[in-house]
Structures are given as C-alpha cells and as structure tokens.
Image (cartoon, rainbow, N blue to C red):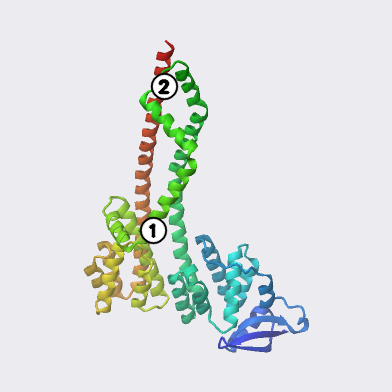
Amino acid sequence: MAKYQYSALKNNTQVIKGMVEASNPREAREKIRALGYTPTKIYIEQSLSEQPYTTNEEIIKNSSTRKVTRLSLQEKIMFTSELEVLLSSGIPILEALQTIGLNSPKWKLKEICLNLQTCILSGMTFAQALNALYSKVFGPVYTALVKTGEDAGELEATLRRMLVLLNKQDRIKGKIIGASIYPGILILLMLGLLILFSKFVFPAFMSVFTFNGASLPFLASMLVGICSFVMNFWWFIILAFGAACGAAVSLFKNPYFKSKWDEFILKVPVISDFVQYINLSNFMTVLQISYDAGLPIMSGLELSYKTVGNYTIKHRISNALGHVRAGKTLTESFQRAAAIPGALMTMIATGEKSGTLGKMLHDAAEVLDKKVDMALEALTKLFEPAVIIIMGGVVLFVAVAFYQMYVGMLGSLL
C-alpha cells in the first residue's frame, strides 16, 4: 500500500490537502470521494516533486488565449464522448477535463477545458461553468441536460444520452451533404466545359464569322454573350451572389417572413415531410433524454421546444405546452394542438397509461428517425432528376447554339 498525497475540493469551494493509503491512484480517488471530497490532484508521498499531473497554472501558461465562439458538430461529439468515457471510468471531472485538454489535437477543446477547470477551481460546478462560459457554444439544450445530470449524480449517463442526439444530427447532416455531392459535381463539370469552350472553341467560330462578314445566329450570340460576361465580370457575379446570400439571411432573421416561409414550406410535397419529421425527431429525442434524466415533464417539454426550428410546428407545440400547464395530460395536449402525428399519439397514450412513458418516447423518437430517413431518400430521388432535367436543358441550349454556329459557318463559307 502506497501513501498518496492529495488536493481536493470540499463542497466545491474549499481546497483541502491530505493523505490516504491505497494500492493504486484509482483506489486513492475512490477513498477521497468516500470522504465527501472531489479530488483534483493525487501523487505518491515519496515523489512529491515529481507530480504526475500538470498543475492548473502550467496549463494556463501553455494554453491558447483565443476565444471560442463556435464548435463544429464533430468537435462537440469528440468532447462529449471523451468526457463521458473518463467520467464512467471513475475519474473526477477536473482530472477528466485536464486529460482532454492535454491530449486533444483541437485548440478549441484545449481552451474550453482550461477555462472550465479554472471556473470549477474557483467554486463553480461543471454545469455552472459550462453555462456561464459556453452556453451559446453548446446550446441551451446541452447545458440544461448537463445541469440535470449533474444534479442527479449521473452526469456520465446524461452525456451518453447527449451523444445519441449529437450522433443522430451528424448522421442526418452527412446524408444531406452526400445527397448534394452528385448535383454539385454536375454543376462544376458544366461550368468547366463552358469556360473551356469560351477560351478555345468560341473564338475559332467567331473568327470565321468575322472573316466572312456574317453575324452569329441568335442562340449562338446569346451563348457567347453569357460566357463573355461570366469571363469578364466574374467578380461582379461573386459579389452579387454574396449580396443575395446576405439578403436571404436577413430575411430569414425577420420573424414575420420566417413564419410565412415556414408555413409555405409545409405545403410543398415531399419537402414538408422532411421538415416536419426532422423537427419532431429532435423534439422527441430531447424530450426522451430529459425524461430519462429525471427532469419534470413540463421542464422537458420547454427544453425540447427550443430544438424546433419551424415556426408553424413551434406554434403547435407551444399550444400543447399551454394545455399541459392547464393540467391536461400529455396525450390530450398533443391531440388538441395537432402537434404530433396520430400513430405517435397512440404510443404516448400507451406510455402514460402503463407507466412506461420513457420507453414509448424512445420508441417514438426511433420511428421519427426512420421517417426522416424515408423523407430524405424521397427528397434525394426527387432532387437528382430535377437537377438532371435542368442540366439537360442547359446542354440542349448549348447544343442548339453550336448547331446554329456550325450551320451558319458552313453557310458563310459557301
């Protein structure tokens, strides 16, 4: 049995030091936690000067001071996954954050771990530090669920549930990107061919027409004019595209326009299914996670409400929340607000009656995930032919223009 010196937090505020006997560092940590303390540093008594853990001061000295304002979905998954694994292994939150910060290849995660450690050492809980520093980076749903899990003493379980939600979002994002690759390649190939023709083919045809004093046919003249404009004023096209994107972003920030657009998009076949199912899928998944984490049903509903992006669907769910506040059951509230499809209502009603609401919410979320996959597949099957038709129209226009050039050139030679 070795003697381990330690530093620990008492009630998350007071720093205390002491010594315990244990056969390994993990057993030492367990003994310290059994005393009601949160260990922050452990080292063998005989090697006090050779501390195996880097101190917080050293991390501050060596870390980046850049401000983190955004994390990618993959970075959130990486942070949550590593933290969940370390906490499940019995490692205290401070040591877990220190380990992630030291070993992560991402400077953003290093900075986040450092700042969270500093706040925890100053007396905050992990949830308080996360909410104070990075509520916008991780989002209100993430921070609220972390607080619930920490209060319930099952933070690692809550992080495991959060990984389910993050991985689902990553999977849907990957499918959307995958569905956009093929049309994107077609558009790039078409642009490349037009540039190639503008550089080498069109000048040859035009020199023949100029030499013979003939004029270009209408479609050929239009094609040459378009290509010439693109080649000479490409910078203007880029600026116009950027201005259009900026205007679109401003429009979608306007609540009135956004509400009207969301109402319109739910009337478009195929697209409406995808939008509805993806919003309800996120809503149901967060509701199931918060319910399993022990959050009151009303708090879980309010938290899940924040994940809905479509104004029309959000309004329906808001009405359902109003019915719940008035004392109605979850099933009755959803029915009155017409917020959930009928098939899912049966599952929720069964869960409320049998006391297995958590399982039924989980099953409902899985059903919605499958609906999202089906809607995305239908959208992809519709989108690709539409792009091919558009590209076919462009190719037909170019082919007819070339035909007119060719016939006109032969006529001018004869």
Tell me which amino acid carries mark 2: Met
**Where 128 falls versus 319 (above or below)?**
below
Residue closer to the observer: 322 or 2: 322
- Residue 320 vs residue 136: left or right? left
> In terms of secondary structure, where does tag 1 sit?
helix
> In terms of secondary structure, where does tag 2 sit?
helix
Tell me which amino acid carries mark 1: Ser
Residue at screen point 40% across, 57% down: 249
> How far apart are labels 2 and 1 at the CA level?
44 Å
Mark 2 or mark 1: whose residue is earlier in sequence: 1
Residue closer to the observer: 206 or 119: 206
Q: Which residue is under mark 1?
A: 250
| Mark 2 surroundings: few (<14), some (14-19) or many (≥20) residues within 10 A | many
Q: Which mark is residue 167?
A: none
Q: Which image quadrant is residue 370 in?
A: bottom left
Q: Using the rendered image of the protein, determine whether residue 329 is visible from the camera's viewpoint.
A: no
User: Where does residue 240 sit, x and y in percent of width and height?
Assistant: 43, 47
- Residue 381 vs residue 210: left or right? left
Q: Which residue is under mark 2?
A: 405
Q: Quarter holding the N terminus?
A: bottom right
**Where 373 falls versus 234 (above or below)?**
below
**Where 403 falls versus 269 (above or below)?**
above
Q: Quarter holding the C terminus?
A: top left
| Mark 1 surroundings: few (<14), some (14-19) or many (≥20) residues within 10 A | few
Q: Residue furthest top?
A: 414
Number of marks in picture: 2
